[in-house]
Image: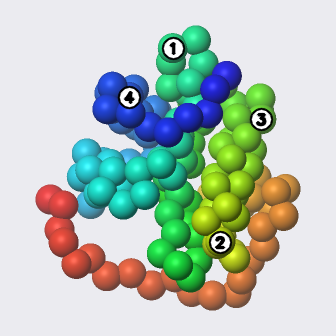
Amino acid sequence: MVIRPYKAGDLAMVLALWHDCGLTRAWNDPHKDIERKLAVNPELFLVCEEAGEIVGSAMFGYEGHRGWVNYLGVAPAHRRKGLAKALMQKGEYLLREAGCPKLNLQVREGNQAALAFYKSLGYQDDQVISLGRRLIADN
């Protein structure tokens, strides 16, 4: 298993992974999300490759104040092997190296498995409400 930055040839496998993991939503065009990420800190878009197959991904970002992670997913057949933890550790390392003091993330309401996973890594509820507003419609 190798964790490395995303490259152009990974597109189809990453999109399939996101679909299999239930990470895509109708209001977000995953192609555009990848294009946008590749324009800003592309080295923080990580994939986990095993035997030539993309089995995990995570998009990390840092704007100078806080780090973020999006699209963390591991293929269902490869879960419970420590791949998500390894992706998070690699992303945390890269963010620390960039001077990032804190990593934030969002979990969709009701996703108890994701909450338990992040809590096992030491993340805690910051007691904030996440707000959002679409500036560019994808669809």
One can see residue 32 in this view? yes
Mark earlier in primary sequence (3, 4): 4
Q: CA distance from mark 3 to mark 1?
A: 18 Å
Q: Earlier in the sequence, mark 3 or mark 2?
A: 3
**Mark earlier in primary sequence (2, 4):** 4
Front in this rendered view, residue 53 or 3: 3
Q: Image point 38% across, 28% down: which residue?
A: 10
Q: Residue furthest bottom?
A: 128
Camera-side residue of 109 and 19 = 19
Residue 49's place in the image compared with 127, above or below, is above
Please identify the quarter of the rendering in which residue 93 is found. bottom right
What's the amino acid at mark 2?
Gly
The answer to which of 8 and 76 lies nearer the viewer is: 8
Q: Nearer the viewer, mark 3 or mark 1?
A: 1
Tell me residue 80's x, y (percent).
Answer: 77, 32
User: Would you name the residue on which mark 2 appears?
Assistant: 99
Q: Which residue is mark 1?
A: 52
Q: CA distance from mark 1 to mark 4?
A: 10 Å
The residue shown at (50%, 63%) is 61
Tell me which corner region of the image, top left, top right, bottom left or bottom right, holds residue 94: bottom right
Q: Tell which circle, 3 or 1, labels the residue nearer the N-terminal end.
A: 1
The nearer-to-camera label among 3 and 2 is: 2
Q: Where is mark 3, residue-wise?
A: 82
* Numbered badge on residue 10: 4
Q: Nearer the viewer, mark 2 or mark 4?
A: 2
At label 4, the amino acid type is Asp
